[in-house]
Amino acid sequence: MTEDKILLSLKDVSLKHSSAHVCRNTLGPFSIDIKSNERIAILGPSGAGKSTLLHIMSGLKECTGSMNFLAKSLRQMSVQELSYKRAFLPQQHETAFNLSNELIISLGRVAREHDPELIQIIKESARSARVEHLLDRSYQTLSGGEKARVHLARIFAQLWDQHNGIMLIDEPLAALDPGLQIELLEAILTFCHKRSLTVIAILHDIQQAIEHFERLILIKDGKIMADLPSHPAPQRELEILYEMKLERFTRSGRKDLLIPCNPRRPHTI
Amino acid sequence: MHQSAPLHGYSKFMGNQTILVYAISLIVLIVMALIAVTLGPVEINYLQSLSTDDEMVENYILWQVRLPRILFCIAIGTSLGLAGALTQGLFRNPLADPGLLGVSSGAAAAAAGAIVFSGSWDWAMPEVLRVWILPIAAFCGALSICFLLDRLARWLTPGSVMGLLLTGIAINALVAAFIGLSSYLATDEQLRNLSFWTMGSLAGANWVILSLMMFVLVVAFLCSQKLSLQINALSLGETVAAQVGINLKKLRQRIILMVAFLSACAVAWCGMIGFISLIAPHIARAIVGPDHRQVLPLSMLLGALLLLLADTLARTVAIPAEVPVGIFTALLGAPFFLSLLAKQRKALIQ
């Protein structure tokens, strides 16, 4: 792969000492190269350091090592410049005041000085995130899943007119019911595909990761245990990752299915 | 980079409804001011003072005492309202208030120190400069408390409503000790100045201070309009605000500077006037919703209204004596604060 196609590269990045002190287990150092238009899922048991890795990529934690984004050092870019190309959807959503959903979505584009198509973009991104019927409602009256979708619409708005950016998502589907999970995952992936944006998402569902993402980064005990393509489904690595047995079902014309199986029952690999 | 973030013109609220709200509060304010002018120990009749212009005592009272005072009252109320709305936006906390958090007392402590200790520098200071000792001292006090509070609250109890208020209590106690020390060391005359001044009074109004205050307000208003969208983003949390391209450090510094300056001006020239800066943004939010682009200007208007009301009461309840205005704002504000606490009970108990 040529150098210029690399979108984001981390070299020996680990948390700065002061902030690493808080969490006991050592994290990193992480070294990853991410190309544009990739779909990457981060998997791992809870507490392994998935969110920390995502926070490092989103610049929320101070770190040592070198990070390059769009062939520039991350330290040289201003927050404003970064916000045009990089969006982050955190796991928890809090608002201090009861802002309207329309306003929250518009805040994705707050760093733009001149934004003539704002109204249109708000509407379109709300439609993509399936919240266009909630625009007039106030945020505090929404359910958890609806709140997550409003914030999804916010990052859609943020990257609406961008190419070659990156979208970092921390468990986007946690509070949603199964039908909506698939619908929204599709929405995120088509949104990013159209704009050749890279998606990096932390997921809990192995199957969704294998089915919809082409590259898996497995995090265990604060280190990258493996970084591999999702096809063929890496059963052995996933078993080591989660310390449990998985059962494999082959399906014609579709990717294999990996399902956790009850350890008491005999199983075949 | 961010200073010229524009006002996006998409919100439905910016329509006729909001303009109507502003218009009504402005009209109420003007009418109240016109009524307030006539009230006082010497009654002023508009027709009379217009027809007989030069020799009347009433004329002097109107132009040199009452009118400056009422305008000053409006200016101070405006700055208190804006300071309150900014503080609540900065700390992302509807219970934040420069008074409760100790910013005003910080300004007061520094000013009290200045009243008591500056007496010994009389020989070194020309008369012109002496007027400025109090505001400058108050500004330094307010600024250092603001920075201290911002650091402490975010370090000790990040993101907690309770934590912020408790930090405020601690700072208030610390600052009260300093005020106590100053009054202990004060001479009798300084003590009288000090105690009257800590209760708050608008009697010191004159045209010079008034025009200065107006200038401060216009600058502060323009700055706040530029920041209002960023404050909106801040209320989504620091994580999100940083990700949508807000330079948090710069934004925070700017708001702190403005809050410190506005509260310091109020404290330096009229002493401690509590609760206006808590109540005004709340009423504003109840009327126009939580969007800071509307909350900031409306809390300025409402702050002016509230303080004018309190000051008119303070002047007229016990004619010819004058009750300190701080007493009225506290009478108005304390029950209001308790009702806010009751509303927020759920969030606070957690």
Image (tube, coloured by chain):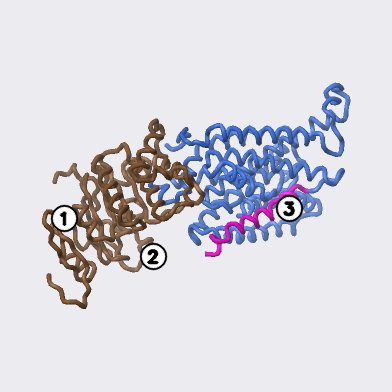
* The one of A114 and A201 positioned closer to us in this rendering: A201
Q: Which residues are magenta?
A: B324-350
Residue B260 visible, this angle: no
Please tell me whether mark 1 or mark 2 is closer to you in this view: 1
Residue underneath mark 1 = A229
Report whether mark 3 lies on the same chain as mark 2: no
Q: Viewed as shown, does residue B107 lie left or right of A20?
A: right
Badge 2: how crowded within 10 Å, few (<14), some, or many (20+)? few
Q: Who's brown, chain-wise? A: A
Report whether mark 1 lies on the same chain as mark 2: yes
Quarter of the image where one finds residue A119: top left
Q: Is residue B339 magenta?
A: yes
Quarter of the image where one finds residue B261: top right
Residue B340 lies, in percent from the top left, at 62, 55
Q: Disc 3 versus disc 1: distance between alpha carbons? A: 68 Å
Badge 1: how crowded within 10 Å, few (<14), some, or many (20+)? some
Whichever of callouts 1 and 2 sits on the residue coming sooner in the sequence is 2
Residue underneath mark 3 = B331
Residue underneath mark 2 = A22
SS for dot 3: helix
Q: Disc 3 versus disc 2: distance between alpha carbons? A: 46 Å
Residue at left offset 78%, top offset 34%: B35
Tell me which chain the residue with mark 2 is part of: A
Tell me which chain the residue with mark 1 is part of: A
**Amino acid identity at mark 3:** Leu
* The one of B231 and A39 positioned closer to us in this rendering: A39
Q: Viewed as shown, does residue B91 lie left or right of A172?
A: right
**For residue B280, above or below residue B217:** below
Please tell me whether mark 3 or mark 2 is closer to you in this view: 3
Quarter of the image where one finds residue B18: top right
